[in-house]
Every structure is written in C-alpha cells, then in structure tokens.
Image (cartoon, helix red, strand yellow):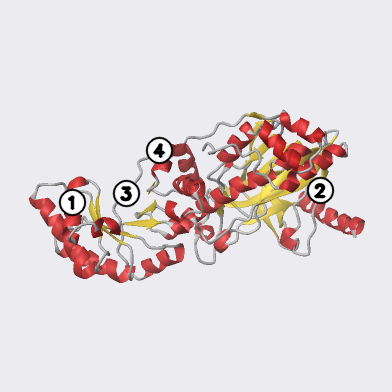
Amino acid sequence: MKNARNYSLLSDAYEFMMADAYLRNGMQDLRAVFDVYFRKTPNNGGYAVMAGLDKVIDYLQNIEFKEEDIDYLRSLGLSEGLLEKLKDFHFNGNVYAIPDGTPVFPNEPLITIEAPIIEAQIVETTILSMVNGPMEHATAARRILDATPENVRVMEFGARRADGPEAALDASVYALMAGCSGTSNVLAGKAEGTKALGTMAHSFVEAFDNEYDAFLAFAKCYPNNCLLLVDTFDTLRSGVPNAIRTFETMRELGMPLDHIGIRIDSGDLAYLSKKARKMLDDAGFPNATICLSNSLNAEVILSLRLQGACFDSLGVGDNISKPEGRMGCVYKEVAIIEDGKVIPKIKLSNDVIKIVNPSFKNLYRAFDKESGYAMADIVCEKDEVLPEDNMQITSLTHFDKFSVIRNYELKPLQETIFKDGKLVYTLPSSEERMRYCLAEIEKLYPEVRRIVNPHEYYVDGTDRYIALKQKMIREAGKTNV
C-alpha cells in the first residue's frame, strides 16, 4: 500500500543526533545490523500476523530530504556535515523481512536492516511506526476470525473508531489481508480492489415517519443487499416484526428475496438473535440472515457461541481498528560489520525478556513432515548450517528449557527485500497476500490458534547460537559493570 505522504522527517530527534555523532566520530562507513521484533503477543494470543512491510518498502524507496527539511534540521543544531549528507540521502542498505501475512511470534526478527550505520539509525522510528499499527490490526482481525465459526462472515467496519484516517485505512486493508470477508471502508475497498460493504444506520430509520417505511424504502433501493437494522426502537416488538412485514411486501411485489436479513447492534445479542431467528423462520423466511455487531471481541464471540446465539455474519469495528492489545515492536542493534566480519552486539537487562538476541541471524520455521504443522521457529547464526533430521533447540530466554525435534522440513522465514538499496522483492497482490496469510495460518496447530490459554509456540535457538548468547551475556556483564 502506498503511503499517504513523504515520511522522511517522521523520526525522533535523537535518531538524527546519533547519526550526527556517528559522522563527527568518523563512523559513517561502519555497517550496522538492526532487528525489528516484539516481545509479547497482544492479548495473550498464541501468535501475531506480520503486516506493514508494504509501507516500509514504499518509505525506503522514496525517502528524501527537501530543502525545507534541511532548514528545519539545521535549527536542531545538527552539523553542516550531516546536513550535506542528507541532501543526497538514499537508502543503500540490505533489508531482510518476513512477508506480510505470515504468522509470527515474540523475539524473532521480523525485519533485519543491514546498512551504513547513519542510514540504519535514521529509519528506525518510521519503520516501527509502519509495522506496529498494521500488525495490531491484522493480529486483532485474526483473533476475531479464530473465535468465529468458519461458516460465518466477518465484516470490518471500524474506520470511525480508528485513531485518524491513516489508521482507519490500515485497519481495513490489513483486516482484509487477515481474512475478513469485506470492509465498509470505501477507500480501502478501492485500494484493495474489492467491493465495499454497507447496510444502514439508525439515522436512516429515524429520518422516516416510522420504521416500516424506512425498511421498505431501503429494500426498494437495495433489494440485493437488504440487511435491515432492527434495534432502533425495540428489536423484538418493533424491529423484527417490521423487517418481516417488509420481506412480505417484497414477496408480494415480486422482488428478489435471496439477500435479505437483519442486523442487531445492541442489547443481549444471544437472546435477541435466538428469538429473532425463530420469528423469521416462523414467518417463512429461513433464508433471512442475522448479522450481529456492537463492540464484538473474541471473548464475546466465544460466549455467544456457547449461548447458542444465531448469526450468519458479524460486523466488527473498534476491536480491529482500535484493539486493546499493542504490538510493542522494537528496533535493536544486534551487530556491527567491520571489514566483512560480523561483530555481535548485545543489550542486557534485569528483565530477561529485554535482553537482546545478538548477532546477524537466520530464522527458520520447522514443519512436521507428517502433519504439515509448524513445530518451532529456529534462530541461528548467519553462517550456520542446520541439521536436516535431528536437532536440539533451546529457549532464547530460559536456557534450561530445551527440546529435540525430528522428522522436520525447514523453511527460511525472511526474504531479501532490498539489496544494496535496490528493491529485489515483488510485492504480492492483495488477493495473493490474503490467500498466503490464510494458508500459513492453517499450518499452525489449532492449540496455538485458540483464544483461551493458547499453547506456547517455540521460538528457540540452536546449540551454537545459545552458546553465543550466553557467552556474550557473561562477557558484557564483566566488561561494562
């Protein structure tokens, strides 16, 4: 997806200050390696969904600093040497990333930037801003979808709840990628080449003298999309009876009845939907569908199912466009490259989860040859060759937790996106991206996908990698304390 504007200045001031300090200390030719990753899956979910790479690609292709940008940066006290360098700034590094739509897990590199240190530093803030939001939307959408029966459609219509117009567009685009059947967002529909979906609001019903007149007027305009909102006044005493009356009139007028239904947007959705289903069936409209909406989240959907609620589709807004969970992606330096040699770097913390996984790494996903399900993601050093049949892997954060995997097939997760500043990756179409996302999620064990207390998916390191990390923790503690 193309970005709405030039985001070259969308960076924290300290990124430019550090870039200036690198230059003043003669470090401008030093190459650095940074990883983008997250530490915890939102809402205690079993997995997240990679998203936003398309925005990062567009940003890195078009980053430039105009004269007015340079003038503003000068006002921050940056050196003329850096400002001269920025006048002809282009991203010249290498980027390796997990494709959008891939299920991903904590502490594994989503995007790896290998570039001259000034370039790698300046792009940090923007890249994080372009990944965090899309991943939140896509992950929230998948959480909703995993809670929903397979035969029930989920429509995204949360633009009005989003934190601004760009977040509204992102929510719709990445919800579609994650598998939502449609969006109400017309701009997103156009961008993604799909038909935007819509019904009516309470205001439409209120604009008429009575509910029946409103329903019939709408039905005559949209007989092939006749989903009537029945909770403006009283769902069971007014809304559903007037919807049934409207359907009867449509039948008398010879209008099609293939796409009729009701939407309930308030009240006890389980109780109301069961009563409404019986009323529609008894009136001779078993084909009339029921759509439920109103601040639905995964837990509410599971509860509705347990209560026997009747619904054919769901409308989900704020819990996709403004979900409670946050990704919290970070951008950490993991290595310096000098004379072609990788020098691993590490950041320590009293909080084990915040200790950086050092070095320039490869990331593989191991699939069980028999079931096809993903078994674990494996971190190793860049030049490491992994065994093909039998491998011990150890937790990246708790070194006493290890396991042995067998009978697996390995797949590298990161693809090369930029090589020496040139884009070498072909962005998939919207349809391809959605199909890919759904196919990859199907490769996760159901226990990983469940909403309540999901099974922990392993992101582990090889023996060699774990030994490196342990050594670096010991040495860094001795050297810097």
User: Crowding near pointer 1: few (<14 within 10 Å), some, many (20+)?
Assistant: some
Q: Position of residue 198 (x, y in %)?
A: 32, 49
Tell me the amino acid under the disc marked 2. Answer: Lys
User: Crowding near pointer 2: few (<14 within 10 Å), some, many (20+)?
Assistant: many
Tell me the amino acid under the disc marked 4. Answer: Lys
Q: Position of residue 29 (x, y in %)?
A: 82, 33
The mark nearer the N terminus, 2 or 4, is 4
* Residue that mark 3 sits on: 198
The quadrant in which residue 297 appears is bottom left
Q: Position of residue 102 (x, y in %)?
A: 55, 46
User: Disc 2 or disc 4, which is closer to the eye?
Assistant: 4
User: Disc 1 or disc 2, which is closer to the eye?
Assistant: 1
Q: CA distance from mark 4 to mark 3?
A: 14 Å
Q: Residue at left 77%, top 47%? A: 334
User: Disc 2 or disc 3, which is closer to the eye?
Assistant: 3
The mark nearer the N terminus, 1 or 3, is 3
Q: Position of residue 155 (x, y in %)?
A: 38, 52
Q: Secondary structure at mark 3?
A: loop
* Residue that mark 4 sits on: 190
Q: Secondary structure at mark 4?
A: helix
Evaluate if marks 4 and 3 touch, with contact meaning CB atoms under 8 Å apart: no
Tell me the amino acid under the disc marked 3. Answer: Gly
* Residue that mark 1 sits on: 217
Q: Residue at left 47%, top 45%? A: 169
Q: Secondary structure at mark 2?
A: loop
Along the horizontal axis of the image, is 228 left or right of 403? left
